[in-house]
Image: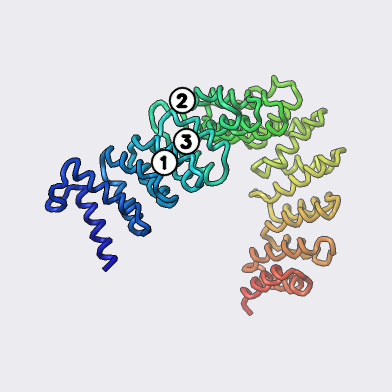
Amino acid sequence: MVQESKRFFFLLIAAVAVGLPGVGAGMAGDSGAKEVIDMVIDALKSNDPQMQSGAIAIVRDIPGPEVTKALVQELPKLPATGQVQLLSALGDRGDATALPAVLEAAKSQDESVRVAALRAIGQLGNASNISPLAEHAAASKGAEQKAAREGLYRLRGSDVDAAILTSLPSVAPGVKAELIGAIGERNIAGAIETLLKTGKDEDRKVRLESFRVLKIIAKPEDMPALVNLLLETRNEADRGEAEKMVAAVAHKITDKNRQAAAVQAVLPNVKDVPARASLLRLLGRIGDGGSLPTLRAALSSREAEIQDAAIRALSEYWPTAEPVPDLLKVAQTSESRVHKVLALRGFVRLLGLESDRPAEQTIDLYKKAMDLAGDATEKKRVLSGLASTKSLAALNMAAGYLDDLALHLEAESAAVRIAQAIVGTQPQRVKEVLHKVIAGTKNDTIREQAQQVISQIKP
């Protein structure tokens, strides 16, 4: 009976609201609107969650500023849960009449009310609400910060984007960083020049946020300006982030053989060693095949910093196996222990990349890497790389280290991974090696994986 009464109540409100014939006779005009509002408010005031939720659902669809005015008058009188629901509905109504009340609700002592109000500001607000939302985002955390940011990103109006750009010079660093984030989320056209300036801001958070947004919205034609920004970046940690930014935009260039053109164009004229080293690392991040001769030449530089940059460009970033011989030579001949280690690690990484090298040659190179590895840590890296090689020779090499006390765990793991890949073609040898793994391992996961591979072998 109670449920039927509720159902009738909501149907009555809805019917009156849309003016269905034969229902609510005599309620047309102001008196009809008042009766609808009174019925909704009675439901909102009730302690029945179902009544409140049903009324909120109907509120979204009842048109008219008078309804909005009546609802905002009731807003502060509701409990927090009711305010949250009503704020959501007021936002969905899109009637800016509610904005002053929503702004007031954003100051509530209850966090859930503030969060709902901040979201509604994004739906109802305008350019005048940019700074309050950005300030709120800068000063808060968690759900409240997220809501303030979402509100900032959703603000509508033809003047909002321009107002965000013009307000940047005059705000505090934290607020500036939030506005820069909004530039990216809103994909504001014509913001590149502004971001190139904020990328040199005194505040590091502002600089890094500028790099992050440039990475998203900058286009290939902006590459020369982005390279210049990198060259003007003096902080070493910032420089790494700027390199990532320029590389990300370079990868938007369709012609992969032209992705590093803007970098190659300025490199010959850059004499400052740290800046030149940054450009070399950037060439590695971009991975344009046309840059390989430049990096190979830098490996022979008399400047240790230039050598280091070239080694890192190839070891850490280069996307193909082509520089394998170059890194092997460095690992074999360099007088610097740091460079030897960097080159060896890169050598092992590149060995794992796709190539047309015969499997036997790959194993020979892994063996050279083991000979060059100066300690157990580096040898473990070699075994970890070997695990990606799918051949009988790789399995045999891994098996050769199962009895090494310092390396047995990595050897066991590598043997199992290789066995999983070749069990179909080398069942007998796989079985022999994995039985040895099972007998010697102290690692339950490795033992279970080895047993699973053996179970695939038919008797």
The residue at 75%/31% (across/down) is 298
Q: Is residue 168 above or below residue 30?
A: above
Question: Is 152 left or right of 12, judged from the image as shown?
Answer: right
Q: Which residue is mark 3?
A: 152
Q: CA distance from mark 3 to mark 1?
A: 10 Å
Under mark 3, the amino acid is Leu
The residue at 74%/55% (across/down) is 363
The residue at 68%/61% (across/down) is 391
Question: Is 187 left or right of 45, judged from the image as shown?
Answer: right
Instruction: Give x and y (percent) for residue 33.
Output: 22, 44
Question: Is 300 left or right of 251, judged from the image as shown?
Answer: right
Under mark 1, the amino acid is Ala
Residue closest to the eye, 93 or 393:
93
Q: CA distance from mark 2 to mark 3?
A: 12 Å
Label ID, residue 120: 1
Instruction: Give x and y (percent) for residue 224.
Output: 59, 24
Q: Secondary structure at mark 1?
A: helix
Q: Secondary structure at mark 2?
A: helix
Q: Which residue is mark 2?
A: 163
Instruction: Give x and y (percent) for residue 161.
Output: 45, 28
* Res. 394 image quadrant: bottom right
Q: Residues within 10 Å of mark 2 (few under 14, many from 20)?
A: some
Q: Is residue 398 above or below residue 343?
A: below
- Residue 289 seen in render: yes
Q: Secondary structure at mark 3?
A: helix
Instruction: Give x and y (percent) for residue 127.
Output: 43, 28
